[in-house]
Image: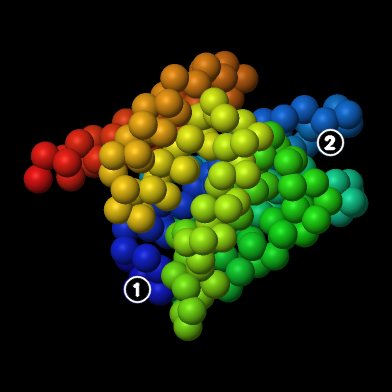
Amino acid sequence: MAILFRAGGFAALCGVLLGLAAPAHASNDPAMDAQVARIGNEWARIKYRVPDKSQQYRQLDALAKQAAAVVAHFPGRAEPLLWQGIVTSEEAAVASMFSQLGLATSARDILQKAATIDPKAGNGGVSMSLGVLYYKVPGFPIGFGSAKKAREYLRTALAVDPGGLDANYFYGDYLIAQGDYVHAKSYLVKALQAPADPTRPVWDSGRRADIRALIAKVDKQQRS
């Protein structure tokens, strides 16, 4: 684990975020939605089906370039920017310690640009993804992390998607990072109660496995 990032934290970044996160939200442009969905499905395949980190990095780097092309094809739209930010964040999570912070900063800037267009894009995915970055990345003087900003963004995402799989998962993970295991578990359990998404089976099953592993971690901590 690169020492630049919080212990146990940054390599777990999804995409989220990301996931970061893996939001799905139809717009009024089916052509754009199809291209955004392709980026999201490829992100999930790389994250959950490619075990080798160096292979992940190479494939994510190629996917980031494809995401940038979608952004260029649909200027002024938040959804492609959201996914460019998610892919760049995931790339940061598997990059060398010398590249992590630069990629994370790029992801933040991309997501902030998306937020200026539509902070609720991706069913709250823009706010959620920014929140994840702010609690995974260390604060000053090393990075731009901020627990306060993270909470604000994650709470905004929860307000948009209160029953969402990712929104509850990442808020639970954030609470664990703050040492609040009791409340964290309630959000993680709620995340598992979200309806399954048959249109994105790789993401859905992978995220639920992440959540179960985190619940097991919380239970172990509470028993100790």
Q: Which part of the image, by quadrant, shows the C terminus?
A: top left
Residue 138 on image: x %, y %: 44, 70
Q: Describe residue 181's horizontal placement relative to residue 137 as left or right.
A: left
Q: In the rendering, which numbered label is found on residue 135?
A: none
Residue 5 visible at all: yes
Near-viewer residue (213 or 176): 176
Q: Which part of the image, by quadrant, shows the N terminus?
A: bottom left
Q: Residue at x 70, y 65 (%)?
A: 109
Q: Residue at x 51, y 61 (%)?
A: 148
Residue 209 on image: x %, y %: 36, 31
* Residue at numbered disc 2: 32
Q: Residue at x 74, y 40 (%)?
A: 121
Q: Amino acid at mark 2?
A: Met
**Badges 2 and 1: C-beta atoms under 8 Å apart?**
no
Q: Describe residue 157's horizontal placement relative to residue 10 as left or right.
A: right
* Residue at numbered disc 1: 3
Can you say whether 86 is above or below 149 in the image?
above
